[in-house]
């Protein structure tokens, strides 16, 4: 299985500020994904990040709010901009490991916005 | 829009009992995942089901997929306390094979 790390593991932020979350994978992958899990809820895909191209955002998520970088095949960042308490969630990155193995998830970043 | 529905959403059962969690989805797909999430933890991949009729088993858990009925089941046999967790099914609805839609999750509690 893939080894995925995320930084920070948790943070408490003030409204109006921005937080950048890092995701590092132990080997090169084509596609990386960012999900949000609101308290007590399921996971929702925010965007797909491919190296060398703009991220593809799902309905309801926009680049101005969640800018994503993918500078190489092992690393990606997600920024949560101009935060409000409604952004309090767990943010998870994942990688695709092939059709038969599916997606592996990072440990998540637990964000609380006050 | 793909919809994925699980039931039950909450399940409390006694050790030693059997039960089934159901996952229905609304659009044709031939790839379905089951994940486990412990409180405060990330998701652990349990099963990847790739075709109609696929059945996979690991320990006390067995998952199956019926693509014609758009239904997957996760069967728990002789439950033990260690199986207490939230279980998610997720369906791959994109032809590129990577965009997942998750069910609401089933919170399982196994009581001694």
Image (spheres, rainbow, N blue to C red):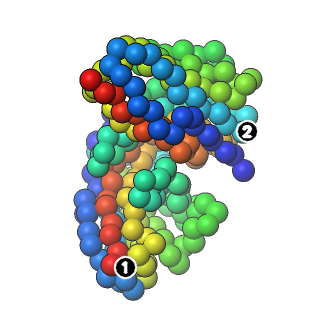
Return the residue nearer the eye: B108 or B51. Answer: B108
Residue A69 coordinates in the image, percent (x, y):
43, 66
Q: Quadrant of residue B72?
A: top right
- Give the class, few, some or many, for how many residues have Cα within 10 Å of label 1's Cα (few <14, many ≥20): some
Chain to which the residue tagged by mark 1 belongs: A
**Residue situated in front as seen by the camera: A73 or B55:** B55
Q: For mark 1, give the secondary structure.
A: loop
The residue located at (54%, 73%) in the rendering is A63
Mark 2 lies on residue? B27
Q: Give coordinates of residue B31: x percent, y percent.
A: 60, 31
Label 2 crowd bin: few (<14), some (14–19), many (20+), radius 10 Å? some
Tell me which chain the residue with mark 2 is part of. Answer: B
Label 2, secondary structure: give it: loop
A102 w.r.t. A16: above or below: above
Q: Nearer the viewer, residue A74 or B2?
A: B2
Q: Quadrant of residue B87?
A: top left
Whole-angstrom CA distance, mark 1 to mark 2, is 37 Å
Q: Quadrant of the C terminus of chain B?
A: top left
Q: Which disc, if any, is residue A18?
A: 1
Identified at 50% across, 76% down, the residue is: A65
């Amino acid at each position: 299985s893939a080894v995925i790390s995320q930084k920070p593991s948790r943070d408490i932020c003030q409204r109006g500020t921005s937080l950048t979350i890092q995701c590092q994978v132990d080997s090169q992958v084509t596609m990386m994904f960012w999900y949000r899990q609101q308290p007590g809820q399921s996971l929702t895909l925010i965007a797909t990040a491919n190296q060398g191209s703009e991220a593809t955002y799902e309905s309801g998520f926009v680049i101005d709010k969640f800018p994503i970088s993918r500078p190489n095949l092992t690393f990606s960042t997600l920024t949560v901009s101009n935060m409000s308490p409604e952004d309090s969630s767990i943010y998870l990155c994942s990688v695709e490991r092939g059709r038969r193995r599916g997606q592996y998830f990072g440990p998540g970043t637990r964000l609380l916005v006050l | 829009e793909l919809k994925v529905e699980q039931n039950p959403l909450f399940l409390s059962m006694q050790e030693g009992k059997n039960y089934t969690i159901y996952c229905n989805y609304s659009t044709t797909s031939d790839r379905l995942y089951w994940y486990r999430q412990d409180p405060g933890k990330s998701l652990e991949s349990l099963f990847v089901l790739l075709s109609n009729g696929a059945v996979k088993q690991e320990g006390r858990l067995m998952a199956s997929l019926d693509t014609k009925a758009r239904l997957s089941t996760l069967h728990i046999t002789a439950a033990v306390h260690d199986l207490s967790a939230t279980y998610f099914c997720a369906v791959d609805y994109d032809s590129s094979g990577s965009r997942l839609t998750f069910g609401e999750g089933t919170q399982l509690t196994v009581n001694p």
